[in-house]
Amino acid sequence: MTTRFHSDETGARSDKKYVSCVACVAYELDQCRAFSEATTDRVRPSLPLLQPAEYTAPARRKICHERDWHETVSFICQGWAASSVRLADGRRQILSFLLPGDIVSATLLFEPTSHCMIETITEVRYRNFKRAELQKILFEHPDLIQPLSKTWIGEKLRADQLAIDLGRRTAHERIARLILNLMERLAARGMMRGETMDFPLCETHIADATGLTPVHVSTVLTEFRRNGLVGISERSITILNLSELRRAANER
Amino acid sequence: MTTRFHSDETGARSDKKYVSCVACVAYELDQCRAFSEATTDRVRPSLPLLQPAEYTAPARRKICHERDWHETVSFICQGWAASSVRLADGRRQILSFLLPGDIVSATLLFEPTSHCMIETITEVRYRNFKRAELQKILFEHPDLIQPLSKTWIGEKLRADQLAIDLGRRTAHERIARLILNLMERLAARGMMRGETMDFPLCETHIADATGLTPVHVSTVLTEFRRNGLVGISERSITILNLSELRRAANER
DNA sequence: CGGCCCTTTGACGGACGTCAAATAGCGTGG
DNA sequence: CCACGCTATTTGACGTCCGTCAAAGGGCCG
């Protein structure tokens, strides 16, 4: 019933200073740019949207529960988070990892509930836009439908890929594909440092994202390491043999 | 490159007579009604949209391949179809079953490719709308965004549920849930006859939808039958013990 | 009648889960 | 500084769910 984003329990704090989105690594992605342009270039006078509420949540914190009610739509500015669902008996499935520039839940643009749980992985900085205001802008600028549809289509594509992975791929393929996917998404954000990237996931995260157990993830990952596919250390991962990793992923 | 809907290879034939959507069981669902109203009540003079191309494809026919290029968006009027993806080595994952009133692929509203394969299960009657015309209507009637968002949200919700099923549920749960889901969707269309419903799926369909093998589907289904949960016969299924079936599905 | 697809059943095997224990890292508090 | 508690990782032994392979029977259709 209450909106848990920026409630005290999450440990999120409100930041006072405001930095323009234009400087953000995620600016070119998804909705961020579309909405920014809509508010700066076209709508005058500038709306309060230009200064959405900004928050910072510590690592490993739930910032949204499945049945929470929201008036706002959140965008990740910095850090990693996970969107997941938990069954009654405790089993958990991670539906997606959220990276800078990602909209936390596109359904919140039109509905007050996201139907899933959001937890931070690292410390996360995010911004909350009021749904009513985004909708108003959307109605006044139907050309925003096109970029919005790209977001929808991308979400659907990745949800379908996840289903294929979980339904029809082996543990090796799933894990290799997860690494490759994250690599591509980080590369699109200019967040790769050569062949290495931040990798703040613990093996439980990987397990819940791939439908496996942490124990099995451990054995597959050590196998990948022994075979020289990747190097893992210090919350980061290095792709040592990309073509072999792709073969393990059974890409195409 | 070519649009395979209504190509000869599919065996689809064009029907001459045109029946109004208002009489359709699916009229109340999804986009059908929204678009029909947009074209009848508001846009004048009546557009060619009012008479979209209508086709009938025989059972067990591919009517769309993963890389096909489309100018049209298809809606199912009658019959069952499946949307699926096939991996290089032949493994297949069914992403959704399409029932009357379903939009075949919502991504086709904005993009020329659906990224998945559509095959009929029964004989299927469907209608093709031109994407350009639907988009024009959408731009002229931004209030259509709201019902459209419902379609998107529903698709996302079901895709997420599928991922949870495949990632974290047992074979028994997956199969029971599939049956219950189909039951609910058919009930929403007024297509239940008491406790029994059409069930044209063969066990291979169920296997590919649940990430299992046909052999294992067979054993689980016979177990369900022996325990009096369901009765299967003649392309139809009867729910004999709903509460037990729900328990098997681990609903919540 | 023969061929094809679907279903069922059984024997067997493998991929992955479960349980357990050992180790390491890391922050907290005394 | 050490003691401690917690979490994460690794490894091994063992178990199980589900896949694979095979064979047999049934229904449908040419």
Image (spheres, coloured by chain):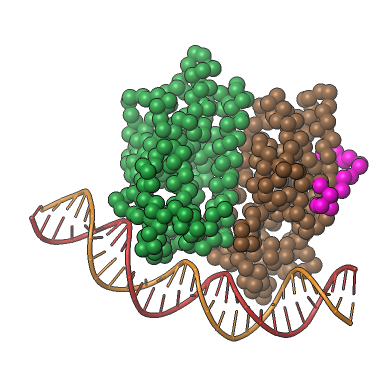
Chain colours: A green, B brown, C orange, D red
The image shows residue B29 at horizontal and vertical percentages of: 72, 42
* Residue that appears at 36% across and 51% down: A237
Residue B78 image position (x, y, % from top left): 80, 50
- Location of residue A100 in the rendering, given as x and y in whole percent from the top left corner: 42, 37
Single out the residue that lies furthest toward the top.
Answer: A45
What's the residue at 31%, 53% (across, down)? A233
Residue situated in front as seen by the camera: A123 or A6: A123
Q: Is residue A53 above or below residue A183?
A: above
Res. B168 visible in picture: no
For the point 33% across and 24% down, which residue is it? Answer: A17
- Return the residue nearer the eye: B115 or B133: B115
Q: Nearer the viewer, residue B186 or A40?
A: A40
Tell me the quarter of the picture where residue B101 sits.
top right
Q: Is residue A23 left or right of residue B165?
A: left
Q: Is residue B31 visible?
A: yes
Residue range highlighted in magenta: B7-21
Q: Is B1 included in the stretch rendered in magenta?
A: no
- Which residue is located at x 64 percent, y 33 percent? B146
Residue A93 higher or lower than A185, as above or below? below
Q: Quadrant of residue B47?
A: top right
- Is-magenta flag for residue B18? yes
